[in-house]
């Protein structure tokens, strides 16, 4: 009997201590609700946070703490329903004090069961207005910092890119001056033409870097034999490393074909080679290798080709290593780099469904590894130099820029086509209705109600057998076009145009 009395007394003291603890907590509103939401207990924290004394609030429905809008939308009842069904309800939102002021609350509601029957809810409310205001201020500061970094990046961009483009424009304008003068020396004429061609290619490569960084570049993935691709661009890579750096290759004969955009791959390799050259001012060796790897870790799993570009330079400091893929970040002097090279490599690899990794040791060198998906098809044989394909018939060129149209007409006529040109999609439809053509070659971005892609889809409906080739240099909509229509990327050369036309379904 004495033992039973002692247990009851201990239980009473325990409950009393717990009640005093709950009632004395000032930073939290801790109170109970009955199954209908009527308040059955109240602590000093509730009075401090919400302004009601126990006599004023006991027996009232807890919905009075909600805003009028939340009450009208049935939020209080919904909160109890979720707590009952899910076993817990948590949220942050506005609540109303006795004096009508608002505060930002963190709310937790737990259902209380006794003998398997719901007897009420335990509710905890915290006033986190100050924390929320601090978070909003921090986010505002971070946004200001991001804007500041953006302007700083634009400053770096204008310094690096403007310098590079001005050099290219200087080459082109100077060479054109020589051509206009009509120099009698064939060697000088050929030198001027070659200089213009080289400057054009370099300008296109720089634009590709910018577009890849901005994720606006349309890509054309295809199966590629890496060894053959390296052989095709060997001279470009040799020119990239210069005379003081040796270029070695370690490409096995069993390397799988890889699936990617050939042009973007070449740009990425050239960027890495130039980056490696700059890391070896006193000379050294750049080794390009390729090997097969099988990945089994998410998010990338399956067969990949690993392309390694290794230098024997001074390595990358650890405090710089985490920043090297950031757009516009560069350790080179102004005018010597745009900070877009490694950003292009990173953007290209991820767009292709792969990734890029880097390993570096100070004083010993750096290895960049691009992982690209294995190609399931046999590599295509691309055409280079002068076009082998010659056509005939009439092509409708849809191009709003008259200067670009003039160039395109010249290339198409060299391939043996008669060309009719219109400036927009509406005119194209009228021309096809009146005269008919053998195929349509249209830019994607055009003025008017219809762009080139919309035109292509419309023609697919009304002229299902009409071949259509699209072109773009910049277009967000191009990303979803690949499976529907072939795309030729600007700027294109005559052999690329010839190859694209030859592949059109007839």
Image: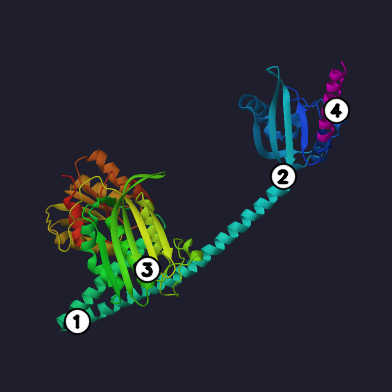
In the image, the segment drawn in magenta is 1-21
From the viewer's perspective, is the residue at label 3 or at label 1 nearer?
Answer: 3
What's the mark number on residue 13? Answer: 4
Cα separation between marks 2 and 4: 33 Å
Q: Position of residue 368 (x, y in %)?
A: 37, 61
Please say whether residue 341 is one of the residues in the magenta stretch.
no
Q: Is residue 320 above or below residue 220?
A: below
Q: Secondary structure at mark 2?
A: loop
Please give the name of the residue rendered at 25% of the width and 58% of the height, measured from the top-left corner.
Answer: 251
Note whether 140 is above or below 337 in the view shown.
Answer: above
Q: Earlier in the sequence, mark 4 or mark 3?
A: 4
| Contact, mark 2 vs mark 1 (Cβ under 8 Å) | no
| Alpha carbon distance from label 3 to label 1 | 32 Å
Query: Mark 2 or mark 3, which is nearer the start of the sequence?
Result: 2
Residue 468 visible in the displayed image = yes
Q: In terms of depth relative to the viewer, which is nearer, 364 or 470?
A: 364
């Amino acid at each position: 009997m004495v033992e039973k009395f002692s247990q009851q007394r201990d239980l009473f003291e325990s409950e009393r201590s717990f009640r005093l603890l709950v009632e004395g907590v000032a930073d939290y509103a801790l109170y109970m609700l009955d199954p209908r939401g009527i308040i059955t207990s109240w602590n000093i924290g509730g009075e401090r946070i919400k302004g009601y004394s126990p006599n004023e609030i006991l027996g009232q429905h807890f919905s009075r703490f909600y805003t009028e809008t939340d009450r009208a939308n049935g939020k209080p009842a919904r909160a109890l329903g979720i707590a009952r069904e899910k076993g817990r309800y948590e949220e942050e939102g506005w609540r109303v004090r006795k004096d009508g002021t608002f505060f930002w609350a963190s709310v937790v509601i737990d259902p209380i069961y006794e003998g398997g029957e719901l007897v009420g809810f335990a509710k905890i409310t915290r006033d986190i207005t100050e924390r929320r205001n601090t978070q909003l201020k921090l986010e505002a500061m971070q946004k200001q910092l991001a804007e500041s970094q953006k302007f700083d990046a634009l400053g770096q961009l204008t310094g690096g890119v403007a310098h590079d483009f001005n050099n290219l424009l200087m080459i082109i304008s100077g060479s054109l001056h020589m051509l206009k003068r009509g120099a009698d020396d064939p060697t000088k004429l050929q030198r001027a033409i070659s200089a213009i061609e080289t400057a054009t290619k370099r300008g296109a490569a720089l634009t590709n870097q910018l577009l890849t960084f901005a994720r606006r570049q349309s890509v054309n993935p295809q199966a590629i034999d890496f060894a053959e691709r390296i052989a095709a661009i060997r001279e470009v890579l040799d020119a990239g490393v210069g005379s003081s750096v040796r270029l070695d290759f370690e490409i096995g004969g069993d390397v799988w074909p890889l699936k990617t955009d050939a042009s973007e791959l070449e740009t990425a390799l050239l960027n890495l080679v130039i980056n490696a050259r700059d890391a070896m001012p006193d000379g050294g060796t750049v080794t390009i290798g390729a090997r097969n790897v099988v990945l089994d870790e998410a998010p990338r799993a399956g067969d990949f080709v690993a392309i390694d570009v290794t230098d024997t330079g001074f390595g990358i400091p650890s405090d710089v290593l985490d920043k090297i893929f950031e757009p516009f970040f560069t350790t080179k002097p102004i005018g010597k780099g745009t900070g877009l090279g490694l950003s292009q490599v990173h953007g290209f690899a991820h767009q292709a469904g792969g990734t890029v990794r880097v390993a570096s040791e100070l004083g010993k060198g750096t290895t960049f590894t691009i992982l690209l998906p294995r190609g399931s098809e046999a590599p295509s044989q691309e055409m280079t130099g002068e076009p082998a394909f010659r056509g005939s018939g009439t092509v409708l060129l849809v191009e709003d820029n008259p200067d670009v149209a003039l160039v395109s007409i010249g290339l198409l006529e060299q391939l043996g086509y008669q060309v009719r040109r219109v400036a927009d999609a509406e005119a194209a439809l009228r021309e096809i209705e009146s005269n008919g053509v053998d195929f349509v070659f249209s830019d994607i971005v055009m003025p008017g109600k219809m762009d080139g892609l919309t035109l292509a889809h419309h023609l697919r409906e009304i002229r299902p057998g009409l071949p259509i080739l699209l072109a773009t240099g910049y277009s967000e909509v191009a990303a979803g076009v690949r499976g529907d229509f072939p795309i030729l990327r600007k700027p294109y050369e005559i052999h690329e145009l010839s190859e694209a036309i030859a592949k059109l379904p007839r």
